[in-house]
Image: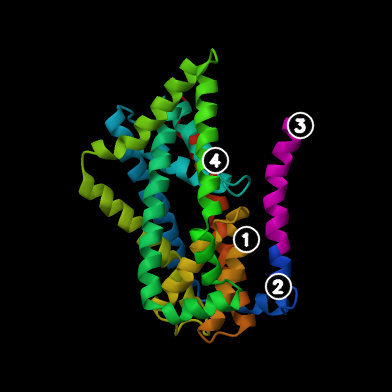
Amino acid sequence: MKKILNTCLKIVFPFVLGGAILYRTYRDFNLSRVGDYLWNLDWFWMTVSLLFGILSHVLRGWRWRQTLEPMGEHARMNNCVNAIFVSYASNMIIPRLGEISRCGILSKYDGVSFSKALGTVVTERLIDSLCVLLIIGATLLLNIHIFDAFFAKTGSNFSSISEALSSPILYIVGVSVLAFLLLLYFLVRKLAFFGRIKGIMYNVWEGVLSLRKVKNLPLFIFYTVAIWLCYFLHFYLAFYCFDFSAHLGWVAGLAMFVAGSIAVLVPTPNGAGPWHFAIISMMSLYGVSWENAGIFALIVHGIQTLLIILLGVYGLAILAFTNKK
């Protein structure tokens, strides 16, 4: 019963949280205008934007296969790509479920070690985190005055953050957590199933280190840069779908892209709610009216979410069809 309740909370809480933030953001909006803007949308630019969104998933699948090969795991390319499609759709049901589901797909259809595949996913997340940090750094340099206004508008205080990081309490808590983890490690070693857990963790760690053995490192770097370029173009080209945002340049687009990338860390379905709030706040700083920014965020996020759902359904169907044997 407790397990069922926890599962329900994992599913329900992100939807409730996202819905609450959406309601708080859009409660004073005139949503009757959304239909008119949707009808007059420049669908050429939206189509190009969606193509870059699809390409980013395909490239991620190709890169994932490359990191699996050094460990002797040879998954089929189409299975890797379709697993990525399914993973993004799965994350809309339960945040981070996609990382587990795509490893399970390759384990089922190509016999790939689940724990090794999970290790490569951890490596991907580390690489992606580094990319986000680099993009944030470059964007802050290009838009320092805009971000300063954004943090002031949203109530963030850099001085309080600095004080928290320099507080001795933070280090005391850190040492305490480390001591607890060490104690837990020695206790687990005494258990009978430690050998099995150790084997699984070794496979995960081997997957994490798979990047060292990638045969074609320049190709891996190319995939990584291309993935994030596609992510940016997937968002930025949507500017040209509306008259009120078409004049915004790539520097403004980069600032909003970063704000949106940070906002989706909040566990809601596809970042619904936090992403809208971040994009609306940033757009208003670039002179777009609050209502127009809200319409942009609502339409663009809705269409991109629909794309993820359709790709997930397609991925499930094609996986079942092409792996009948």
- Residue contact between numbered discs 1 and 4, judged by CB atoms under 8 Å: no
75 to the left or right of 94: left
Q: Which residue is mark 2?
A: 26
Q: Position of residue 13 (x, y in %)?
A: 71, 49
Secondary structure of residue under mark 4: helix
Q: Position of residue 253 (x, y in %)?
A: 44, 74
The mark that comes first in sequence, 3 or 2, is 3
Amino acid type for the residue under numbered disc 1: Ala
How many neighbours does mark 3 have within 10 angstroms: few (below 14), some (14-19), or many (20 or more)?
few
The magenta region covers 1-20
Residue 197 vertical position relative to residue 6 in the rendered view, above or below: above
Q: Based on the picture, tell me whether residue 17 belongs to the magenta stretch.
A: yes
Amino acid type for the residue under numbered disc 2: Tyr
249 to the left or right of 274: left
Q: Nearer the viewer, mark 3 or mark 2?
A: 3
Q: Which residue is mark 1?
A: 272
Q: Rounded to the nearest whole Å, what is the CA distance between mark 2 and mark 4?
A: 43 Å
- Dominant SS in magenta: helix
Residue placed at 38% from the left, 38% from the top?
120
Q: Which residue is mark 4?
A: 176
Q: Is residue 45 visible?
A: no
Amino acid type for the residue under numbered disc 3: Lys
